[in-house]
Image (cartoon, rainbow, N blue to C red):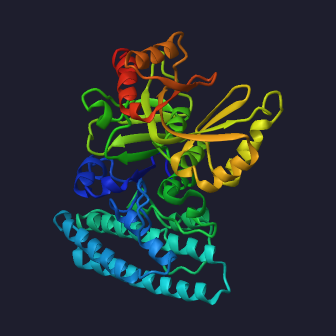
Amino acid sequence: MAEKRLRVEKIGGTTMSRFGEVLENVILKDDNDIYNRIYVVSAYSGVTNELLEHKKTGQPGIYQSFEQNDEYEPAMISLQNRLCELNRSFKEIGLDVATADRFICERISFAVNILKSMDNVISSGYVNRTEVLLAARELLASIGEMHSAFNSANILQNLGYSATYVDLSGWQDRRERTIDARIRHIFSTLDPARTICVATGYTKGTEGIMREFDRGYSEVTFSKIAVLLNAEEAVIHKEYHLCSGDPVIIGEDKVHPVCNTNFDVADQLADVGMEAIHPKASKPLETAGISIRVMNAFDPSHSGTLITKDYICPRSKTEVITGSNAVTCLEVHDTRMVGEVGFDMKIMKILQDHNISYINKATNANTIDVLIYERDCTPAMLDDMRRRFELVTTQNVAIVCAIGSNIAKPGMLAKAARALADSNINILSVSQTSRQTNMQFTLQREHFVQAQRALHRTLCEEES
């Protein structure tokens, strides 16, 4: 089923919206390297935001209208019109617009009917509302990926290539299968050596791919296909390189592609929101010994950044400066803390009860600072904390990190701290484990951009 040269490749939504360039730079770049490649595609840019909610801002989409029993059908029709308009934009590169319109209109019509049925079931009061809402969320999510995957396969077919639309969405399939079982079943009848496989980023399964992974579901599909089919490499095509810093903040002329790093560094990046790949998607690949290559789809001459399990940079250097300005420092001060074994477990238990993951933790005799995402700092969680501890305060801050596979060099931390001090930036707290892959600095939020520039200039530009 899978050959040694098989690659599984994920194409993100923003990149998919420039599919003409994707054809030229990625899929059809080399006439001798067209097959033995499985593409897992996201919905076109903004489509899943419209279906669910905006990934970054949280602006509600069609899902919330359904959840709140508002009118969702007009929004679905509006979405249908938008997707048909998108179809017309791909006519010049080979899309059969009439066929593509018919395909997506049928899917949206069916989805509306299913949502109406779900509405009736919820109204009956005989079923668990939460479970039905999760199913509705999955149904809506699948629409965008079906649309982009079908279009991609159709374009390739019309250009004269053998291409197959691989529908993992379970469209009108009543058979109950796990995610893994569905992937195995679908690919058991396909030979990637003879056809270009374009798979939906959403996979229907009895366990519900969004229950655990939510908006990371397309990367999980990508990861599972690579592992189950024993791919040689897993490739992620983005609209930018995995760089030494954010080019918008640092400047495009100052950043450079990382080129090589390891899974540990990828995890550190994900922890502060700069995801090379969703952590729950990368772990199975790491365990299976499958390397990840992050490529810029619009810089086809560059080989991208290779992420492997054992890579250690041959010389000590900082590979990436990154961070987040959407974090809150939760400070718990309690005079009963000193000398009490396991006191911090009480704090961790409350965070666990509210499904909150923390970024880092600093402690002294009677104070524990926990850094969490601002969106997780809810009134309910704070109420629980304040009932248990003497003084609980919060401060909206920023975290800036200097990350690398080999930063274990005497003076590296001092150099970073000096760079911040020279820019008149006060460090609220600093964290680094003995593994020495990530120096984390908590700062006043207004210093977020300035701190990244200072650290990048000192640790990445002057050291390169």
Residue beneath the point at 30% across and 47% down: 32
Using residue 122 as the reference point, say whether residue 323 is left or right of it: left
Pick the front one: 333 or 432: 333
Residue at the image position 60 percent from the left and 58 percent from the top: 212
The picture places residue 18, in percent across and down from the top left corner, at 25, 55
- Kindly identify the residue that appears in the image at 80 percent across and 33 percent down: 336
Which quadrant is the C terminus positioned in? top left
Residue nearest the observer in this picture, 117 or 233: 117
For the residue pair 119 and 95, the one nearer the viewer reads as 119
Q: Residue furthest left?
A: 92
Residue 164 seen in the current view = no
Identified at 55% across, 89% down, the residue is 120
Side (left or right) of 166 relative to 87: right
Q: Picture coordinates of residue 249 (x, y %)?
A: 32, 34
The answer to whether 58 appears left or right of 359 in the picture is left
Res 413 seen here? yes
**Res. 248 image quadrant:** top left
* Image x and y of residue 378, in percent: 58, 53
Picture quadrant of residue 101: bottom left
Q: Position of residue 395 (x, y in %)?
A: 53, 39
On screen, 166 above or below 275? below
| Figure check: 318 above or below 399 | above
Between 394 and 24, the residue placed more toward the observer is: 394
